[in-house]
Amino acid sequence: METAERARAINDRLGSQRDVAAGLAQVAQIFMQQGRYREADERYEAALAAARRAGDKGLEASLLQHQGGLAGAMQRYDRAVERYQRALRLFQEAGHEAAVMRTCNMLGLVEHRQGRLAEARAWYERSRELADKRQDQVSLGAAAQNIGIVCQEQGERLREQGDERSARQKFAEAERFLQESLKIKIMNQNQPRQAASENQLAQLYLQMGQLDRAEEHAGRAREIGERLGDLRGLSTDYQTLKLIAQARHDDQAAAQWAAKEQAVDQELARRARGGEGSEHALAGLPQQLLQALGQLAVTCVQAAANHSPLPSDAARLLEQLDSPDAGPLQSLAAYLRRLAAMPPHQLAQQLAQPPADLPDPFPPIFAQLQTAVQQADLH
């Protein structure tokens, strides 16, 4: 914060309104990470004023997008929608289709959080149309997944209301979109995303009473999760398999899956506390190096969130770490490189699935970064 404020003051004296706006936004992001939302909002307002003085509509739209994320974190959903819609208009005027696509997805997420499923689907559909037009397979798969989940939740509501026929129709629609999303992820060889889609389909088939198909998809998700060491995904996979066993009235299998789920949850909790006794601990590394690596992780996440290239010093450090001589740090470097290249809307999910062999103390760092990204609505 001290460094960001010094840079902002220098830019203010130099009179570069665009740099002033960028500096104020940086300060706002720091306030947001500290949970000081009111002060963050004030800095975003000041940054918007500076961007307008500079006549930079692209920066103004980006700031509105970030401020919308802040409003969502504050559960001020009407304000979030208003900010996103203003950003959307500016991106549309500039012909920035990729930004329009991402903003539509963000509007869908805000509506989804409020339980407004029809409105959420409309925004997801617009994002999907643009992804299809741009032949953006990653965004197309994400939009199809979101629409499928909306259909599934609509089916659940209809079932609760006693309209089983309409519920079944919605479940069938959800199946079509979720299968489409799964095919795209398999085609792109994105195994972590494939596992998430497999599990979502397993949950859907469980609701539809198709237990064999549910078990088939849950089993695939589990196999991928165990191979990749994705503990967070495995917790969900084991839970789904437990529910399937319960639906079969197989108490023994349900107890076995419940035990696996509990063991994974305990390990995740241990890692969140700092991973005491972990075989991957970086014993002996200087504290200064650990701090530098932690800052490198933040820089990579910020680059992805802002859709900007890595600073040259961060890129050089990644190159140094990405070699066999770096030992356990090589897996960290590979993961950071993937993070830096992530589309903003996929960032939170990628942060939720760090490699199992990441050395301590990095799993808790990524958990904190995931929370910060989610609060900023940067999905």
Image: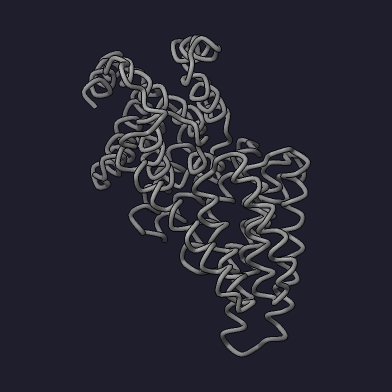
Q: Can residue 90 be seen in this view?
A: no
Q: Position of residue 245 (x, y in %)?
A: 61, 71
278 relative to 124 in the view: left or right: left
Q: Can residue 165 be seen in this view?
A: yes
Residue furthest to the left? 2
Q: Where is residue 336 in the image (x, y as percent from the top left)?
A: 50, 26
The front one of 7 and 194 is 194
The front one of 43 and 233 is 233
165 relative to 86 in the view: left or right: right
Asked where in the image residue 298 lies, by quadrant, the reply is top left
Q: Is residue 278 above or below residue 258?
A: above
Q: Quadrant where the N terminus lies? A: top left
Q: Position of residue 46 (x, y in %)?
A: 30, 36
Residue found 30% across the figure and 13% down from its top = 14
Residue found 66% across the figure and 55% down from its top = 145
The front one of 164 and 377 is 164
Residue furthest to the front? 252
Residue found 45% across the figure and 15% down from its top = 314
Q: Is residue 64 above or below residue 55?
A: below
Residue found 53% across the figure and 40% down from its top = 350
Q: Position of residue 157 (x, y in %)?
A: 57, 79
Asked where in the image residue 212 lies, by quadrant, the reply is bottom right
Q: Report the label total.
A: 0
Q: In this view, does 310 lie above or below 69?
A: above
The front one of 72 and 379 is 379
Query: What's the colour scheme?
Result: one colour
